[in-house]
Amino acid sequence: MADPNIGEKVAATYERVFPKKPTDNIFNSCAIFYALGEDGFKVGADGGRLWEVPVEYAENSTMQMVGEFDVLDTTKISVFDAARYDQKIAAGTIVYSYLEQKQNQGSDEAKFDLIAARIENGRKSHIALINRQAWSTSAPGPLDLTSIPSIISDTPAVGIVGGINGATFTWWRNRQNSGAHSVNPFDNLVNAMELTFDQCSLGGIKMTPTCAVSDLASFVGYQSILGQRLRYMVQDLGKKGDAAFLNSAVMFKSIPFFYDEDAPANHVYFLNNEVLKFEYLQGAWIAMDPAVDPANQLMNVHKMYTMGNFICAARRHLGVVTGVN
């Protein structure tokens, strides 16, 4: 393969090439980012300086069995609180000079539209940043998103999420089980996933997870044991042999199961879009401002930004299988 050193100007401007836009060699699927746009995982907000999520955390303890003339308990019982999440900003710039713009004009001479391609690269780079932030296993800093692994923790009884301490309040803990194998690789994975799924739900029928996400190795491990447990019927194959099945067919308890290259290794996460969302300020979801040209430079600058954060209303309906192998 030729060294990628000829530069953007030469790559974009002279010889005729196919295809008419650069072929992606660096970006991953960013699966969780695109999943945010489906099934209600993403929601816009009109404004506010932070997001407050009301939380119902206790029963009314005055409810009790009483005698015919007993006096009822009139104690006021606190049953509500709120989790709070700061708004975070992901941002960057897309820059191109007047010279690049003029050199790249004209459909016959241009290999591809350099300006459009650079803007698209900026968009994908922006998405990649948010996706990596979503799966970060480091403790979120003051500028970082509240990541999925910090909400759905390997150690649910440790740490503060949304200002509520899971060590103090048992109701503010996600579900966690080990998927480590006993004898053969992944021999405990499905059992651990079933247990976690059921723990996340109410009676197995309400508040069930809406999708499962893992790293690639855990996803492949799950597929490797499906043949031992399930029978697939594929119609209209005729005489064609097919020893596998499409990833779109990979389900678990009727929910989609997919992988994200940025997800932590050896983990399977169970998400529920009723309690976990990415909330953003209206007009600030991958927003790009019109080009601005500095007064003393022959160039254009676009600013791209997203203002939002992950919010969680009930960690007990979220879960993770750890140590998958």
Image: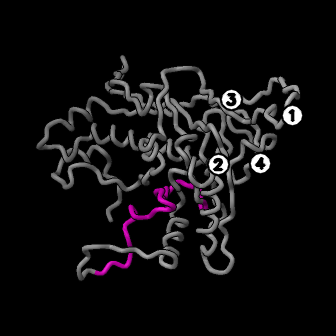
* Labels 3 and 4 touching (C-beta < 8 A): no
- Taking depth in this image into account, of 21 and 7 the one nearest to the observer is 21
Rendered residue at 60%/73% (across/down): 186
* Labels 2 and 4 touching (C-beta < 8 A): no
- Taking depth in this image into account, of 230 and 305 the one nearest to the observer is 230
* Labels 2 and 1 touching (C-beta < 8 A): no
- Spatial CA distance of label 3 from label 2 is 18 Å
10 Å crowding of disc 1: few (<14), some (14-19), many (20+):
few
| Residue linked to disc 3 | 82
Q: Residue 152's mark?
A: 2
Q: Amino acid at mark 2?
A: Ile
Nearer the N terminus, badge 2 or badge 1?
Answer: 1
Residue with the most extreme front position: 68
Q: Which residues are drawn in magenta?
A: 241-267
Would you identify the image quadrant in which residue 118 lies?
top left
Q: Is 295 contained in the magenta span? A: no
10 Å crowding of disc 2: few (<14), some (14-19), many (20+):
many
Q: Nearer the viewer, mark 3 or mark 2?
A: 3
Magenta: main secondary structure: loop
| Residue linked to disc 4 | 157
Q: Nearer the viewer, mark 3 or mark 4?
A: 3
- Spatial CA distance of label 3 from label 4 is 19 Å
- Above or below residue 120? Residue 306 is above
Q: Amino acid at mark 4?
A: Ala
Q: Amino acid at mark 1?
A: Gly
| Residue linked to disc 1 | 67
Q: On the rendered image, what quadrant is the N terminus found in?
A: bottom left
Side (left or right) of 32 relative to 180: left
What colour-coding does the image apply? one colour
Q: Amino acid at mark 3?
A: Ala
- Above or below residue 4? Residue 91 is above
- Spatial CA distance of label 2 from label 4 is 11 Å
